[in-house]
Amino acid sequence: MQRKSILTIAALLLMSLVGCHQANEVTWSVQTTSSDHAWLALAHSEHTNHGFGGESAWTIVEMKQNISSSKPVEVLEFEEGPNSVQDLKMNWPSPDHLDITYRGNPPITFQAIKAFGKQITVEKLP
């Protein structure tokens, strides 16, 4: 009888863990191409719910070569929350410079200043 109880409890725990996992949901995305059309800047916000209060959200900016099938490389990440990213815009003033502007007060959890030899500037607007 004890073995059956342990197996039942283990099965219930496994089902609860599997039921708590949810795939990331993309809630917003945008992309822009450099002026020479060689590079892409991609931005998106994601939300996930791990169950039992385990929600998280973030906004990521990535870069990749326009004609390449390689995965994009992250250059900026914001942690979303009550002070989330607002009005995020990406602009290529030149083929070697990506300019990112935004409003809000989200914590920046990762910021690159250069990727693939391209300068990256980030500016918080009032």
Image (cartoon, helix red, strand yellow):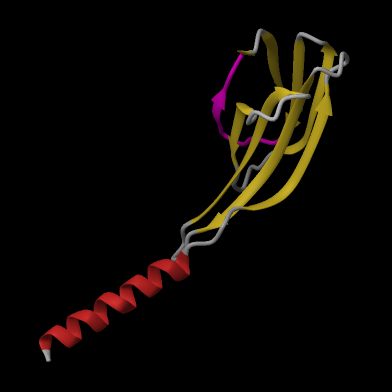
Quadrant (top left, top right, bottom left, bottom right) of the N terminus: bottom left
- Does any portion of residue 112 appear in the rendered image? yes
- Does any portion of residue 125 appear in the rendered image? no
- Residue drawn at (48%, 62%), measured in percent from left and top? 21
In the displayed structure, would residue 68 be above or below residue 47? above
Which segment did they paint magenta?
Answer: 104-113
- Residue drawn at (70%, 24%), measured in percent from left and top? 64
Give the quadrant of residue 79. top right
Q: Of helix, strand and loop, which mostly describes the magenta segment?
A: loop
Residue 43, given in percent of the width and then of the height, sits at 72, 35
- Residue drawn at (83%, 28%), measured in percent from left and top? 32
Q: Nearer the viewer, residue 32 or 45?
A: 32
Q: Is residue 27 magenta?
A: no
In the displayed structure, would residue 9 be above or below residue 22? below
- Residue drawn at (61%, 36%), measured in percent from left and top? 106
Q: Is residue 105 magenta?
A: yes
In this image, 100 relative to 12: left or right?
Answer: right
Residue 74, given in percent of the width and then of the height, sits at 60, 28
Q: Nearer the viewer, residue 116 or 102?
A: 116
Residue 65, given in percent of the width and then of the height, sits at 73, 21
Check the image and name the residue furthest to the bottom. Answer: 1
In the displayed structure, would residue 12 be above or below residue 116? below
Quadrant (top left, top right, bottom left, bottom right) of the C terminus: top right
In the displayed structure, would residue 10 be above or below residue 69? below
Residue 104, given in percent of the width and then of the height, sits at 70, 36
